[in-house]
Image (cartoon, rainbow, N blue to C red):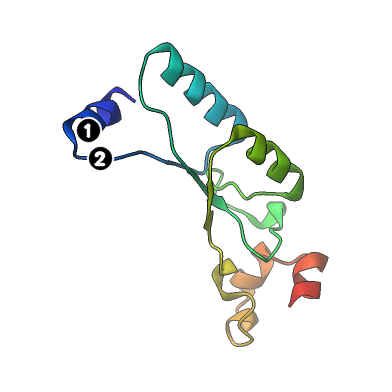
Amino acid sequence: MDWTAQKISSGLFQAIGASNWINSRLREAAQWCRAHDKPNFVASQIGWSLAESNPTAITAPTLIHLSPPDYDDFMNVGLPIFADQAQARGIFDPVKRLQSERIARYDTPTTHQRF
């Protein structure tokens, strides 16, 4: 955060955001920023879309998808959320839907109902 604070104070950056951070990590970062008088994140980007994620099909351990229970917790963190993969990798496109790697990540009853 020191490096980003320098970039903000120099005018190179206006603000910073987080991507794929869980709520507890965002809270820890906010506490650290307050304790060290550094700028905190202004927004969080997380996997979130109309399609519901299937956690067992997410192969990259650093990808975090907003689940319904996490939503309320994210609202309590107080950061705006930017949806990553809002189009759900094209799962609602009938042609792209036929590609199995796209289906697995969002293969849930909720996604099928919404489709």
Q: Looking at the picture, tell me which residue is in the foreground, 59 or 29.
A: 29
Residue at x 44% of width, y 17% of height? 34
Q: Measured from the top left, where is residue 98 in percent x and y?
A: 64, 83
Quick one: which residue is furthest to the top in this view? Answer: 35
108 displayed left or right of 76: right
Q: Amino acid at mark 1?
A: Lys
Residue at x 66% of width, y 34% of height? 76
Q: Amino acid at mark 2?
A: Phe
Helix, strand or loop status at disc 2: loop
- The image shows residue 51, relative to residue 74, as above or below, that is below
Query: Quadrant of the image for the N terminus?
Result: top left
32 displayed left or right of 23: left
- The image shows residue 108, relative to residue 3, as above or below, that is below
The residue pinned by badge 1 equals 7
22 displayed left or right of 72: left
84 displayed left or right of 111: left
Name which quarter of the figure residue 8 lies in. Answer: top left
Residue at x 19% of width, y 39% of height? 12
Name which quarter of the figure residue 14 lies in. Answer: top left
Helix, strand or loop status at disc 1: helix
Q: Measured from the top left, where is residue 11 in percent x and y?
A: 19, 36
The residue pinned by badge 2 equals 13
Q: Residues within 10 Å of mark 2 (few under 14, many from 20)?
A: few
| Tag 2 and tag 1, C-beta contact below 8 Å | yes
C-alpha gap between disc 2 and disc 1: 5 Å
